[in-house]
Image: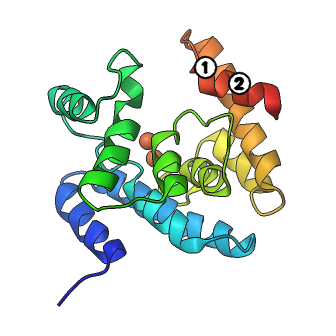
Amino acid sequence: MILNLEDQIKAALKVNYVDKSKRYMHIMGVYEKSIKLSEHYKKDTNKVILASLMHDYTKYLSKEKQIELMQEANYDTSISSNLYHAYTAEYLAKSLYGIKDKEILNAIKYHPTGHPKMTDTLKILMIADITEENTRDYQVSKEVRKYEFISLDKALKIKLEYMVKDAKKRNYELSDYTKELIKEL
Ligand SMILES: [Fe+2]
Ligand SMILES: [Fe+2]
């Protein structure tokens, strides 16, 4: 039986995350929420399906393996190591699964930070990442959920405002992409 891409990635996630059931549930929650949002806003559901399944695909690779993949992809390893998983997942989406669509690839790559050029796929992925119902029960999740089916931009804005507060509280620097995006919203 030849599996389509969606089923291939799902099968790989099941194997890779066999000991990480919470993260597996998170990914599947993001997948389900992304589809719902995409259908609600009449967007291209195929794009969010692949972006959501891939977004945390490499989350638990060792730091060594992450760096190895970053170098293989010619990505700058001086970025925050918290962002490696997004870049390496984007790289595997291309190199392992042959995904070429830039909107899907950029959504995977920029899902933790956002980007000044936001596509609908990236907006939906960033919102679903915080509002999925399987594992996210933070206060910010509840706030963003109030708006996610009303306005993607409003929902995203609430998430970004939270990211600004969190960065201040925990004393870390936001990515330049996030800072630029905030100016535009
Ligand atoms: Fe992530
Ligand atoms: Fe995630």
- Give the spatial CA distance, label 2 vs label 1: 6 Å
Q: Where is the N terminus found, in terms of image quarters? A: bottom left
Q: Looking at the image, which residue is at 52% across and 36% down?
A: 112
Q: Amino acid at mark 1?
A: Asp
Q: Residue furthest bottom?
A: 1
Q: Looking at the image, which residue is at 54% across and 50% down?
A: 129
Q: Position of residue 26 (x, y in %)?
A: 43, 55
Q: Which residue is the site of mark 2?
A: 180
Q: Amino acid at mark 2?
A: Glu
| Left or right of 45 in this view: 2 | left
Of the pair 98 and 86, the residue shown nearer to us: 98
Of the pair 26 and 96, the residue shown nearer to us: 96
- Does mark 2's beta carbon lie closer than 8 Å to ligand 1? no
Q: Looking at the image, which residue is at 56% across and 9% down?
A: 171
Mark 2 in CB contact with mark 1 (< 8 angstroms): yes
Residue 41's disc is none
Q: Secondary structure beneath disc 1?
A: helix
